């Protein structure tokens, strides 16, 4: 029997080190005015020793605490990340060990900035089929590890952090609709090569650090289009109108993208939660960090409908419409 699912826990953790636009303007050829106007970002958290795993563990512990369950009750841990501490053990296994989730299956999922939506979708499918009952889904990144600090077009955008949710099966009737897509033909637009790149036979190239490259304008246009597509698909799959959705939580990349979408679908900007001014773009972590902040502000109530939408490298995109 297909089960209903609901979110029962939220958590997040960001590094304590705040880097303002002004701070960045001292090491990069940029200004607070340019960054604020073009992106809406005012500051971001940059790791000073915190790892992707340590941020994920802290976010996980908070989410479990809110959910009121023990780690041993988890059946599944998925960590969405493009900046893991290790290829293996996965961040999921590191989290599992640290929190004592002795009964869980744990793994990582690489979906770039769409990673949290993809990971939540995978967890939902496991729960709906009855295979598992309780899942911990985490988005965690230390983007500062992979930023080219000489590229002012990307360096100003990103930040570090982790967010987590606990989801469970429920007997209550709840809406859950999912829409996901990818387009691998556009992989060059946003790219993070693995390290090291070594060709043994000729053109030997060893790089000591993996660096992200991005065509900002292309990603901007892509994001605006696929967010509208995702909203349309989720609404057409459900029996509700867009006006019935309480909050739309978009991947926090640029306030101009969010404003464009708000105008295009004619939904008040107040319904689009935004915290990118404080954290910048934390890739797979941005949506769960936003959810935890909304939870902390008492914005989330049972019965509310939320739309979560991610987009990013791959190219990848997708969304989830769910009822709290
Ligand atoms: O999570 C993955 C998703 N990533 C995104 O969603 C990123 C989407 N793209 C964007 O958010 C925007 O394209 C950016 C914020 C990255 C760039 O904004 P833009 O309005 O597209 O600027 P641009 O690249 O067209 O550059 C405009 C000008 C250029 O100068 P000229 O050629 O007009 O003289 C750039 O060199 O702004 C210059 N510029 C900067 N100036 C000061 C680019 N970056 C900076 C900077 N500070 N940091």
Image (cartoon, rainbow, N blue to C red):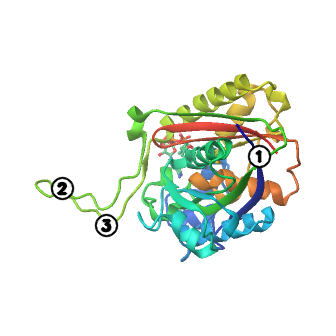
Name the image quarter holding the C terminus: top right
- Seen at 62% across and 63% down, the residue is 161
Q: Provide the secondary structure element on which disc 2 rests.
A: loop
Residue 32 or residue 181, whichever sits in front: 181
Q: Position of residue 116 (x, y in %)?
A: 60, 49
285 above or below 6? below
Point out the frontmost of discs 3 and 2.
2
- Seen at 49% across and 42% down, the residue is 216
315 above or below 45? above
Q: Position of residue 296 (x, y in %)?
A: 83, 60
- The residue carrying mark 2 is 199
Q: Provide the secondary structure element on which disc 1 rests.
A: loop
Sort mark 1 into few (<14), some (14-19) or many (20+) by Cα contacts within 10 Å.
some
Residue 63 or residue 298, whichever sits in front: 63
- Seen at 49% across and 61% down, the residue is 28
As measured in the structure, the alpha-carbon distance from the residue carrying label 3 to the one carrying label 2 is 14 Å
Q: Earlier in the sequence, mark 1 or mark 3?
A: 3
As measured in the structure, the alpha-carbon distance from the residue carrying label 1 to the one carrying label 3 is 38 Å
Does residue 50 appear to the left or right of 213 in the view shown? right
- The residue carrying mark 1 is 273
As measured in the structure, the alpha-carbon distance from the residue carrying label 2 to the one carrying label 1 is 45 Å
Total labels drawn? 3
């Amino acid at each position: 029997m297909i089960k209903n699912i609901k979110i029962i826990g939220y958590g997040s953790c960001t590094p304590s080190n705040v880097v303002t636009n002004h701070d960045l303007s001292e090491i990069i050829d940029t200004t607070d005015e340019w960054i604020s106007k073009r992106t809406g970002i005012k500051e971001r958290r940059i790791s000073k020793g915190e790892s992707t795993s340590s941020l994920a563990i802290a976010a996980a512990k908070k989410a479990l605490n809110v959910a009121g369950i023990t780690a041993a009750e988890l059946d599944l841990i998925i960590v969405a990340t493009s900046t893991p501490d290790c290829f293996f053990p996965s961040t999921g296994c590191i989290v599992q060990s640290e929190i004592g989730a002795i009964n869980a299956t744990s793994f990582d999922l690489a979906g770039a900035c769409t990673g949290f939506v993809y990971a939540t979708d995978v967890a939902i499918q496991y729960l709906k089929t009855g295979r598992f009952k309780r899942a911990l889904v985490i988005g965690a990144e230390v983007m500062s590890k992979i930023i080219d600090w000489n590229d002012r077009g990307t360096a100003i955008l990103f930040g570090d952090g982790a967010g987590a949710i606990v989801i469970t099966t429920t007997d209550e009737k709840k809406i859950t609709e999912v829409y996901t897509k990818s387009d691998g033909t556009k992989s060059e637009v946003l790219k993070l090569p693995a390290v090291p790149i070594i060709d043994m036979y000729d053109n030997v190239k060893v790089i000591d650090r993996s660096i992200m490259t991005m065509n900002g304008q292309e990603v901007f246009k892509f994001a605006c289009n696929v967010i509208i597509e995702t909203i349309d698909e989720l609404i057409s799959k459900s029996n509700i109108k867009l006006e019935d959705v309480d909050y739309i939580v978009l991947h926090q990349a640029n306030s101009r993208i969010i404003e464009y979408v708000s105008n295009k679908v004619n939904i008040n900007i107040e319904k689009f939660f935004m915290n990118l001014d404080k954290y910048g773009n934390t890739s797979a972590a941005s949506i769960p960090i936003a959810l935890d902040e909304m939870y902390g502000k008492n914005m989330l109530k049972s019965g509310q409908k939320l739309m979560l939408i991610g987009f990013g490298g791959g190219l990848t995109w997708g969304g989830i419409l769910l009822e709290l």
